[in-house]
Image (cartoon, rainbow, N blue to C red):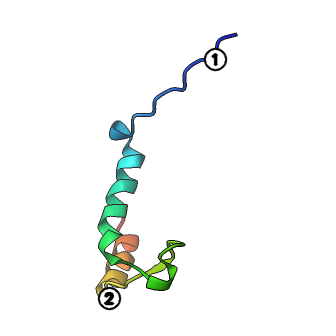
């Protein structure tokens, strides 16, 4: 029996993949890797500030 080739997933037209990519790129500059964790990839996410919390609360009250 011959094996079927794996199906190719097209992420360019997948709306979920595009949303994940946009979110990842939006927070990329906020991620700060700790030098001692360089080999493990651990770090933390810098806060944007109070405006980020207010914006999240507002979007939760008024979903689009």
Disc 2 is placed on an element classified as loop
Q: Quadrant of residue 25?
A: bottom left
Q: In the picture shown, does residue 9 fall above or below 15?
A: above
Residue 45 in the figure: left or right of residue 37: left
**Placement of the C terminus among the 4 image quadrants:** bottom left
Which mark is first along the chain, 1 or 2?
1
Residue 10 percent location from the top left of the image: 39, 34
Single out the mark in the foreground, 2 or 1: 1
Q: Is residue 28 visible?
A: yes
Disc 1 is placed on an element classified as loop
The image's mark for residue 3 is: 1
Q: In the picture shown, does residue 6 fall above or below 29?
A: above
Residue 63 percent location from the top left of the image: 36, 64
The image's mark for residue 32 is: none
**Placement of the N terminus among the 4 image quadrants:** top right
User: CA–CA distance between discs 2 and 1?
Assistant: 53 Å
Q: Residues within 10 Å of mark 2 (few under 14, many from 20)?
A: few
Q: Nearer the viewer, residue 34 or 59?
A: 34
- The residue shown at (47%, 76%) is 38
- The residue shown at (36%, 55%) is 21
Q: Which residue is mark 2?
A: 49
Q: In the picture shown, does residue 41 fall above or below 21?
A: below
Residue 19 percent location from the top left of the image: 36, 53
Q: Nearer the viewer, residue 62 or 27?
A: 27
Residue 24 percent location from the top left of the image: 37, 62
What is the residue that sits farthest to the bottom in this orientation? Answer: 50
- The residue shown at (47%, 79%) is 43
Q: Quadrant of residue 32?
A: bottom left
Q: In the picture shown, does residue 28 fall above or below 5?
A: below
């Amino acid at each position: 029996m011959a094996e079927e080739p794996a199906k190719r997933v097209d992420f360019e037209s997948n709306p979920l993949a595009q949303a994940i990519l946009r979110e990842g790129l939006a927070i990329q500059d906020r991620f700060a890797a700790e030098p001692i964790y360089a080999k493990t990839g651990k770090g933390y996410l810098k806060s944007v500030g109070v405006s980020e919390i207010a914006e999240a609360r507002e979007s939760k009250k008024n979903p689009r």
